[in-house]
């Protein structure tokens, strides 16, 4: 019996991975299919062990926990983003610093000073939104196409990664040949082996491994360690070597950002944010409730202000202070109309604000009564406030 590594999608649309024991890859495929799984990746372990690219990497991190204390340590993950996501979602940490422990000290210091790339947080937020949307679909029983959507998403991401791999190789391979005299021979062979591995595996369905391989290649060509030590370079060639080093670093940085940004855009596209998603977002914002609260507070303030002013006028009248001016305001139709309108609307919006979960007909009754009361109040105002 041999073991085969697989990535698959369950009937509920959840992606899983692991190993399956079988005599052959065909038997392994039959076992997974019989279990109701849609296979994304099925590979022989030998290929993974030979390349040694399937192993976990160790990352150093510094983060802040919920108690605002600094936490330092290491974490294993297949790539930088997976390490970041694990720290954020599983351990609930705010990550300040995250770097491959195998990186050179100069690279670590540079990453520490520059901070985390914002693409990590953006990508995670997009994935969270997609997961929430799928969960809502599942709760509403609309998961009939969930498996096919997951398969399509995996294929779209694979095509994007392959396209970026081709673009990276088209620039890195010629650059390696042009700068062979400045690059350490051992490091150059390591890069060439990684390039060869990428070219062999770029049509694999294992998207996570392709991402990891590409990221490691970009990190490798961006490292100062691949160039000959300054002591081995004549002084007249130092400036030229620095220029060529900056070319490698620029390619690494540009492609790293392009891949991160592209994956975010791709996930947004695959999330299929349709009208229902927009409605859900609007529903979460609760705009009607906010507008109701504003109107309620405005009319409360208006009624309270007029009430205080009227009490003040009655006080002046009682103590016979500025009687003529006081009577002028007490007989003012506008003042009494505004006060009455404020009280009327305050009562109406009270029911809407404090009893928001009403049936549609209850809301209709409140609206009808409000309109009717406003019309009656306006028409009958001279009778209700006969002294004005």
Image (cartoon, rainbow, N blue to C red):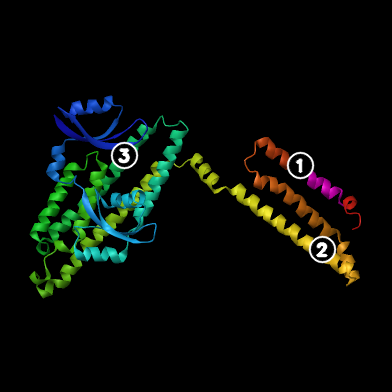
In the rendered image, which quarter is residue 60 located in? bottom left
Residue shown at 78% from the left, 53% from the top:
341
In the rendered image, which quarter is residue 37 located in? top left
Where is residue 100? Give x, y as percent.
Answer: 23, 56
Question: Magenta span covers which residues?
Answer: 369-381
Whichever of callouts 1 and 3 sits on the residue coming sooner in the sequence is: 3
Q: Which residue is farthest bottom?
A: 235
Disc 1, SS: helix
In the rendered image, which quarter is residue 188 located in? bottom left
| Residue 268: in magenta span | no
Q: Say which residue label 3 marks.
A: 154
The CA span between labels 2 and 1 is 29 Å
Residue shown at 67% from the left, 45% from the top:
352
Whichever of callouts 2 and 1 sits on the residue coming sooner in the sequence is: 2
Give the foreground label among 3 and 2: 2
Where is residue 116? Give x, y as percent.
Answer: 32, 59
């Amino acid at each position: 019996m041999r073991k085969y590594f697989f990535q698959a999608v369950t009937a509920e649309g959840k992606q899983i991975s692991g190993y399956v024991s079988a005599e052959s890859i065909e038997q392994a495929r039959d076992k997974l299919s019989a279990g109701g799984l849609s296979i994304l990746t099925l590979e022989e372990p030998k290929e993974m062990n030979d390349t040694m690219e399937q192993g976990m990497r160790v990352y150093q991190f510094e983060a802040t926990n919920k108690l605002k204390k600094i936490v330092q340590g290491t974490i294993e993950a297949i790539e930088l983003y997976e390490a970041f996501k694990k720290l954020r979602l599983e351990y609930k940490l705010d990550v300040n610093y995250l770097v491959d422990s195998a990186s050179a000290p100069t690279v670590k210091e540079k990453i520490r000073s520059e901070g985390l790339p914002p693409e990590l947080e953006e990508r995670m937020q997009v994935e969270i939104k997609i997961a929430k949307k799928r969960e809502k679909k599942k709760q509403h029983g609309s998961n009939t196409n969930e498996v096919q959507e997951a398969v399509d998403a995996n294929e779209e991401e694979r095509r994007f990664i392959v396209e970026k791999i081709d673009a990276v190789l088209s620039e890195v391979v010629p650059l390696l040949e042009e700068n062979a005299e400045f690059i350490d021979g051992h490091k150059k062979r390591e890069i060439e082996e990684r390039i060869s591995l990428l070219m062999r595996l770029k049509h694999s369905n294992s998207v996570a491994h392709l991402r990891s391989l590409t990221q490691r290649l970009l990190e490798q060509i961006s490292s100062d360690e691949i160039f000959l030590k300054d002591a081995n370079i004549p002084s007249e060639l130092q400036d030229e070597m620095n220029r060529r080093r900056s070319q490698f670093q620029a390619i690494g940085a540009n492609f790293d950002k392009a891949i991160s940004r592209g994956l975010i855009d791709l996930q947004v596209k695959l999330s299929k944010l349709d009208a229902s998603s927009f409605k859900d977002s609007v529903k979460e914002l609760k705009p009607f409730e906010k507008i109701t609260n504003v109107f309620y507070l405005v009319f409360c303030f208006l009624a309270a202000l007029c009430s205080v002013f009227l009490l003040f006028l009655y006080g002046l009248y009682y103590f016979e202070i500025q009687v003529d001016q006081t009577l002028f305001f007490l007989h003012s139709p506008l003042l009494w109309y505004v006060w009455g309108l404020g009280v009327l609307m305050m009562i109406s919006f009270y029911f809407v604000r404090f009893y928001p979960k009403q049936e549609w007909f209850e809301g209709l009754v409140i609206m009808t009564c409000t309109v009717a009361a406003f019309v009656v109040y306006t028409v009958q105002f001279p009778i209700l406030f006969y002294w004005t």
